[in-house]
């Protein structure tokens, strides 16, 4: 992999980054996977201009043309999966289990879904309106149609945890609805997205419709957010960066889709099936080492089942093997960088310093001289004022807070700046549904950590702005235009 030359894609041409290259580090081995192009602000603006130039012609393409290209893209990714998967594992540290099930197949599924979406009529016919004669115009029966027009040029800026899947969730609906795009993957793992851009060119997307710029510094993303040639920013990442995008985008009235941080509250009621709850919570450890914003990282547990749940999680943790990502036996791989590992370890220490019990301590697991590993960690006897409980850790760490009654559980769950994805475990599904309605979160799972990809996805409060997923992804990448006429 390291011997391959990776380049930007701007206006249909592969070009070197204006700032040279930078190394992409394998988080499991600390070896260099490859050299990514270091784009400059000028490169970013050139990509935005190329997307702007391609926009009118792409907007005029028929839904059938867009659908066929998206299907061809899905097929090409599927055919290249044996090549893409090892690269994604090397860049991200994702385990073979997670990678083979989700990192590539889910991207294929998303392009297939939005190939169908390109054929959907998402316009709305208005009922006739009887209007009297006024100084403005003669009266009569006035008809109308609400059209969903493409926004124009979309900057797709993604997080490092699921580089291809996350990008597919932005690119698919954007292209289906007639937008052109500039992709800016996370600095830690951009190589698979560069490969993806090459696949887009190979299957026949016109020059300039799909562009990619990469870089290790914030200036590339900043240039896109500030560019007058960018009409919309679709961003997945930290709340801190999302706030900066919100501020910078205001200057040119950017349309924004911001999927930001989370601190998933998982309420475990006294009548919960504890095995189900443990299985759901353990996904924090076994699903990409907790590097996912939807994870149920904050267990809020009724005192009557508190010891049972903590004991069950304590017994489960050693069964989740920490190891090299490419091994089929590995359940917990490394986190993305050494800096992030140190940050996670700092949160674990803060829990101990503030009076909680580190029941399972995953710091510096034995047997790893290289790689950025953190093992499953369980911090119990917490309260909602502790740093590890309030802030997003984005690692394999579960904190446990006890409660006495349902009202207290709701209050604890909602006492957070985040509101992305919460959970309720109770065998009384009517009660669980009622509690879900009181939670300040964009998504609530009842007795499951599973997803429904047709559901609108996004957050309350500091967890973001807007919704995507399913048809909502189509709506998010369009502007509403009303057209009226005399009947």
Image: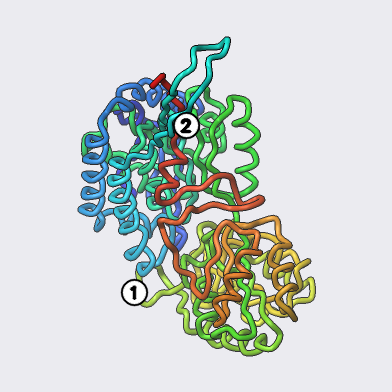
Instruction: Name the quadrant containing residue 396.
Output: bottom right
Q: Reading the chain from its start, which is encountered first: label 1 or label 2?
A: 1
Regarding mark 2 in the picture, which secondary structure is present there? Answer: strand
The image shows residue 94 at horizontal and vertical percentages of: 42, 63
Which numbered circle lies on residue 173?
none
Q: Is residue 136 above or below residue 235?
A: above
Residue at 50% of width from left, 53% of height from top?
Answer: 457
The reply to whether residue 284 is visible in this rendering is yes
Return the mark for residue 480: 2
Residue 108 percent location from the top left of the image: 29, 53
What is the x, y in percent for residue 155? Answer: 46, 35
Please give the name of the residue rendered at 47% of the width and 79% of the height, measured from the top-left corner. 320
Q: In this view, which residue lies farthest toward the top? A: 135
Residue on which the image places disc 1? 328
Question: Is disc 2 surrounded by few (<14), some (14 to 19) or many (20+) residues within 10 Å?
Answer: some
Identify the residue at horizontal 47%, vertical 84% (top origin). Answer: 319
Q: Do we see residue 5 in this rendering?
A: no
Q: Nearer the viewer, residue 482 or 120?
A: 482
């Amino acid at each position: 992999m390291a011997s391959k030359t990776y380049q930007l894609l701007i206006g249909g041409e592969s070009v070197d980054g204006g700032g040279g290259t930078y190394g992409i580090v394998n988080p499991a081995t600390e070896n260099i996977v490859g050299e990514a192009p270091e784009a400059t602000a000028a490169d970013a603006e050139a990509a935005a201009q190329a997307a702007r130039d391609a926009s009118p012609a792409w907007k005029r393409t028929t839904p059938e043309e867009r659908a066929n290209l998206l299907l061809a893209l899905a097929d090409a990714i599927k055919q290249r999966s044996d090549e893409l998967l090892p690269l994604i594992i090397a860049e991200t540290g994702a385990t073979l289990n997670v990678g083979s099930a989700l990192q590539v197949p889910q991207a294929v599924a998303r392009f297939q879904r939005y190939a169908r979406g390109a054929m959907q009529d998402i316009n709305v016919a208005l009922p006739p309106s009887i209007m009297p004669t006024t100084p403005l115009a003669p009266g009569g029966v006035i008809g109308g149609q609400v059209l969903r027009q493409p926004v124009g040029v979309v900057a797709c800026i993604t997080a490092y945890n699921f580089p291809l899947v996350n990008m597919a969730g932005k690119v698919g609906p954007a292209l289906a609805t007639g937008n052109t795009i500039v992709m800016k993957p996370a600095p830690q793992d951009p190589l698979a997205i560069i490969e993806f851009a090459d696949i887009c060119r190979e299957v026949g997307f016109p020059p300039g419709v799909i562009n990619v710029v990469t870089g290790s510094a914030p200036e590339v993303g900043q240039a896109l957010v500030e560019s007058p040639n960018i009409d919309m920013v679709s961003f997945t990442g930290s709340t801190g960066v999302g706030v900066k995008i919100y501020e910078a985008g205001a200057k040119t009235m950017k349309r924004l889709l911001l999927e930001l941080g989370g601190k998933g509250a998982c309420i475990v009621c006294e009548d919960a099936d504890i095995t189900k709850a443990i299985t759901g919570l353990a996904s924090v450890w076994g699903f990409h080492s907790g590097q996912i914003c939807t994870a149920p990282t904050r267990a809020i547990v009724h005192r009557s089942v508190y010891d049972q749940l903590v004991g069950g999680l304590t017994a489960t943790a050693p069964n989740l093997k920490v190891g090299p990502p490419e091994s089929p036996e590995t359940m917990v791989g490394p986190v993305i960088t050494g800096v992030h590992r140190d940050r996670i370890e700092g949160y674990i220490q803060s829990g101990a310093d503030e009076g909680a019990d580190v029941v399972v301590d995953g710091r510096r697991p034995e047997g790893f001289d290289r790689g950025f590993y953190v093992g499953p960690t369980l911090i119990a006897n917490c309260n909602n004022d502790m740093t590890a409980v309030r802030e997003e850790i984005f690692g394999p760490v579960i904190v446990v807070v006890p409660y006495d009654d349902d009202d207290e559980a709701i209050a604890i769950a909602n006492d957070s700046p985040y509101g992305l994805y919460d959970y309720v475990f109770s065998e009384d599904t009517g009660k669980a549904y009622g509690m879900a309605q009181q939670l300040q979160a964009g998504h609530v799972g009842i007795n499951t950590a599973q997803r429904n990809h047709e559901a609108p996805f996004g957050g309350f409060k500091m967890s973001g702005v807007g919704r995507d997923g399913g048809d909502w992804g189509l709506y998010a990448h369009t502007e509403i235009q009303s057209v009226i006429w005399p009947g």
